[in-house]
Amino acid sequence: MTSAILSRLKSTLGQAVSQGADGRPQVAPDSPDGLAAALGIASEENWRVRIGGGRTWMPDDAPADVAVSTVALNRIVSIAPSDLVATVQAGVTIRGLADRLAPHGTWLAIDAPGSPDRTLGSILATGTAGGVRHRFGPIRDQVLGTTVVTGDGRVIRAGGIVVKNVAGFDLSKIQVGGFGAFGIIVETNLRLRALPQARHALVATGDLDRLANTARDLVDAAIDAIAIELVSPAATGSAAWRLVVDIAGTAEGVVAEAARVGRVSAPLSWDPVPGAGALRSAIAETALDGPVTIRAGVFPSSVPDLADLITERLGAGRMAASMGRGGLRWTGSTRPDKLIALRHLLAAREIPVAVERAPWPFRAETGHFGEFREGVRPLSSRVRAVFDPRGILVSPIDGANGG
């Protein structure tokens, strides 16, 4: 069957088609139309399709007949600094995008976990957000519009290219965090921010409960930080927890806000980290220090108790918790049954746990979101039927109910 698939795809897409190390046909088109042609053929033939980007985050191991990659869709279509918008294809890396935006005095306000060589498509599809969500909101808040290729090969454009120009329901919101279940994001219109003149981090080390209390005091005092985050000892190689406060803005504003942090948190001592970018990158990359990454949606007041429970049930791992909004992320090595048991415990507290990253056999056993609330799965299935009528797109949200 593999040779027949290769022959059919190559007859239409030529050099965009190859055979992977596992023998599976792989398609990496360099245009949305090429991807649409590939999915149109796959839908017609009823081939199962798995989706990948640069393969730096999610394991590329889902069972499928064809592997599709957006890595060749790597153009930055346009940058409009005066409007603070850019149009970018899914295969562009975060590092590459930052390098192109900086000379224009702009940046994309996300710091998703993983390598800086993650592709934009990976971050949008998985909806993974880091600490700067505290100031700028979730990934979908940075998206003005998307171009998506559906499971049957249609090209659909949703949203727009300017802020607040969408009337009614924005279909882009379905795609961001949809894990490819509702189509493949190929191009995105992004909301940019002015590049800060200065950026510094303040780091305090100590007991988890004390740092968590301090973090809540800083949030209550409306400290103007882009991130206020608790980071576990394993994630930083230290002997204790750390509280990281990331401040960005004008040079004078950063100095003034750092002084406010000191006053609100006295007598806690802080170590300044000029620049802060390298520290944030190091925290982001700790999410790769283990085969499994989960995210728990939790209120800041519950972070210490949840961190203790996760450590007890899954092991110390690497943890980072946003103390404004964003939840707690854990990375490490565990078994599916342990995660399912943890989910049962947290269900009573109404704390959701999503599997952000894991080998496919693990995800197939636990499910991505765990148990859907009543009515959500049927609704999701109906929406999927619109974007993928033949059900050929393989997505982590197809997994088991997770206990």
Image (cartoon, grey):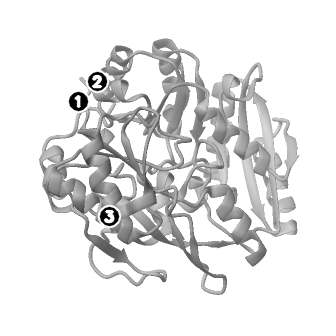
Give x and y (percent) for residue 349: 34, 29
Residue drawn at point x = 64 percent, y = 72 percent:
193
Residue drawn at point x = 65 percent, y = 87 percent:
82
Q: Quadrant of the C terminus?
A: top left
Residue drawn at point x = 63 percent, y = 57 percent:
94
| Amino acid found under the numbered disc labelled 3 | Thr
Distance from the alpha carbon under mark 2 to that under mark 3: 37 Å
According to the picture, the residue beneath numbered tag 1 turns out to be 400
Distance from the alpha carbon under mark 1 to that under mark 3: 36 Å
In the depicted view, which residue is nearer to us: 45 or 331? 45
| Amino acid found under the numbered disc labelled 2 | Glu
In the depicted view, which residue is nearer to us: 28 or 355? 28
Which residue is outermost to the bottom?
82
| Amino acid found under the numbered disc labelled 1 | Ala
What is the crowding at mark 1: few (fewer than 14 residues within 10 Å), some, or many (at least 20)? Answer: some
Asked whether the beta carbons under mark 1 and mark 3 sit within 8 Å of each other, the answer is no
**Of the residues under marks 2 and 1, which one precedes in the sequence?**
2
Asked whether the beta carbons under mark 2 and mark 1 sit within 8 Å of each other, the answer is yes
Q: Secondary structure at mark 1?
A: loop
Give x and y (percent) for residue 357: 45, 35
Give the image quarter of residue 78: bottom right
Whether residue 149 appears in this view of the structure is no
Distance from the alpha carbon under mark 2 to that under mark 1: 6 Å
Q: Is residue 178 above or below residue 156?
A: above
**Of the residues under marks 2 and 3, which one precedes in the sequence?**
3
According to the picture, the residue beneath numbered tag 2 turns out to be 365
According to the picture, the residue beneath numbered tag 3 turns out to be 12
Left or right: 311 with respect to 47? right
